[in-house]
Image (tube, helix red, strand yellow):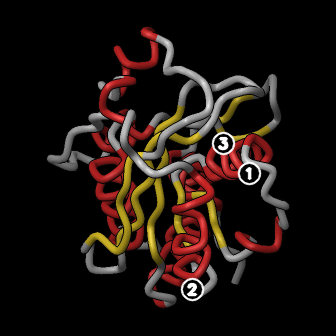
């Protein structure tokens, strides 16, 4: 039996949940090619925090980004730099599947932050990650004919569309918890006959 795209997304979400994935989110100094990670959170399958830390960046946090996530230069002044937090993160992430809302962005931020601290980047380090945003786009089913793919929905929109009572605060812990709930909500949906 061939599943329609929404049913396929539901089945994929169920399969991902069977892996008891971790969930990861980062906050950054921006979205461009020079941006870097300033906060990271990893939670487990049950929603408990496994790792959470602010990260002292090389560059200053622009005021427009502080307006989005609320992280100030003062807050990260005494935080550990990326080269000190990465070894612990690497051990955690090598252990199991990792659900990330907008994985492409976070993986690019990992690579860019590694480059800032001259840490060799090996893409295989996060090869066990999967993108909850892409899965939700297929589940939601709004086709974008210009791109020839399903239209991506922001984490905030996904939460509202699924009536999840968690806010998207643009802080790493809250966003990992919301991403986890999005995956669970997709998986709980009945597959139509």
Residue of label 2: 96
Please provide percent x and percent y for residue 5: 64, 60
Cβ–Cβ under 8 Å for marks 1 and 3: no
Q: Quadrant of the N terminus?
A: bottom right
Percent from the top left, x then y, of residue 97? Answer: 58, 80
From this view, report whether residue 185 is shown above or below residue 139: below
Residue at far top of view: 63
- Would you say the residues marked 2 and 3 are in contact, meaning their CB atoms lie under 8 Å apart? no
- Whichever of callouts 2 and 3 sits on the residue coming sooner in the sequence is 2
* Residues tagged 1 and 2 counted as in contact (Cβ below 8 A): no
The residue that disc 3 covers is: 105
Q: Position of residue 77 (x, y in %)?
A: 38, 33
Q: Is residue 146 rendered to the left or right of residue 129?
A: right
**Residue tagged 1:** 114
Circle 2: element type? loop
Viewer-side residue, 15 vs 63: 63
> Which mark's residue is nearer the viewer, 1 or 2?
1
- Image coordinates for residue 176, horizontal then vertical, percent: 37, 56
Q: Tell me the distance, in whole angstroms, between the alpha carbons under discs 1 and 2.
A: 21 Å
Determine whether, in the image, residue 107 is placed left or right of residue 84: right
Q: Secondary structure at mark 3?
A: helix
Residue at left 15%, top 47%?
165
């Amino acid at each position: 039996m061939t599943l329609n795209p929404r049913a396929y997304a539901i089945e994929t979400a169920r399969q991902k949940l069977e892996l008891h994935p971790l969930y990861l989110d980062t906050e950054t100094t921006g979205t461009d090619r020079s941006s870097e990670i300033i906060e990271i959170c990893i939670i487990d399958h049950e929603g408990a925090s496994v790792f959470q830390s602010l990260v002292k960046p090389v560059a200053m946090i622009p005021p427009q980004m502080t307006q989005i996530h609320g992280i100030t230069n003062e807050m990260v002044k005494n935080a550990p730099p990326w080269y000190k937090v990465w070894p612990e993160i690497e051990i955690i992430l090598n252990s199991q599947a990792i659900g990330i809302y907008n994985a492409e962005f976070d993986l690019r931020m990992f690579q860019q932050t590694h480059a800032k601290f001259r840490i060799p980047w090996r893409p295989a380090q996060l090869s066990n990650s999967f993108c909850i945003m892409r899965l939700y786009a297929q589940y939601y089913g709004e086709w974008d004919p210009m791109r020839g793919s399903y239209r991506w929905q922001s984490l905030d929109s996904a939460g509202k569309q699924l009536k999840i009572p968690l806010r998207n605060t643009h802080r790493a812990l809250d966003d990992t918890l919301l991403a986890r709930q999005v995956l669970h909500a997709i998986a709980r949906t009945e597959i139509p006959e």
